[in-house]
Image (cartoon, rainbow, N blue to C red):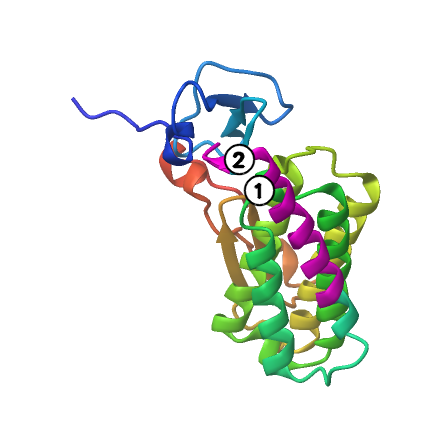
Amino acid sequence: VCSEGMQRCSGDCTSAEHGLCVPRDYNGNVVANCSLSDYYCHVACECAENYGGNDCSVDIDVSTAYAEARTQLASDLLATTHIQEADDTTVLSHIGLLEGILRVPNQVTHDTLLTCSAALEVFLTQASGRSTMCTSANYNFLVGALSVLLNSARTAAVTVATEEVHTSIYTSMQLLTENCQDNAAFREDGLGLYATNLRIITGITSVDAFPSQEFVLPQSMYDYYTGSRVP
């Protein structure tokens, strides 16, 4: 008999002495478990007093130093936006660095999260008006960066993404979709992509065509497993 797998914590949190794997729903309440297809549920290691890191394998002093380094890297990355030429290669490279900074949620402080969300907003502002940002490869890359930022806002060590962070993330989403809409042709197929926690589709239609034209958001893994379809 086949059954859907459950989410597991990184390295199973090393050992019971180092930390415990705790499943939580979207509102942060502890639940019994999280299925692989359910984005609204996530698991994370909650480390014992002397340990840190995604899998609770790192000494707390080292983990704290890593967190401070990520905050400094985020600040330095934001500072480069004022001194480097914002060509496509530079913008995409910076966004890749931003993703790397956010890859270990237990080492992401609120200051890091706030700085990274502000930096992504700047990078997408710099890229406005460029059709190259809306090619399938680049669009997928940018949606991936937004996905990582959203995930960090939900699972970071502080788990207190402020309204300022959420507003900045929403602005970045608007910048990305509006830029691609500005470079789209009327009635052409919409450009749609999904990540585990984000679905975006952009396209241009008219009021007359809209009643007979159906837009279907890209399926998430959750939709796929549950058979849902979101028009």
Q: Which residues are magenta?
A: 54-77
Task: State the image coordinates of residue 18 (x, y, percent, origin top left).
Answer: 46, 24
- The kind of residue on which mark 2 rests is Asp
- The kind of residue on which mark 1 rests is Val
Whether residue 213 is visible to the viewer of this picture, yes or no, is no
Answer above or below: position of 186 versus 42.
Answer: below
The residue indicated by pointer 2 is 59
Instruction: Check disc 1: other Cα within 10 Å, few if <14, some if 14-19, many if 20+.
Output: few
The residue indicated by pointer 1 is 62
Residue at 63 percent across and 54 percent down: it is 211
Task: State the image coordinates of residue 38 (x, y, percent, origin top left).
Answer: 46, 31
Helix, strand or loop for disc 2: strand
Answer above or below: position of 68 versus 55.
Answer: below
Disc 2 versus disc 1: distance between alpha carbons?
Answer: 5 Å
Whether residue 53 is visible to the viewer of this picture, yes or no, is yes
Answer above or below: position of 188 versus 106.
Answer: below
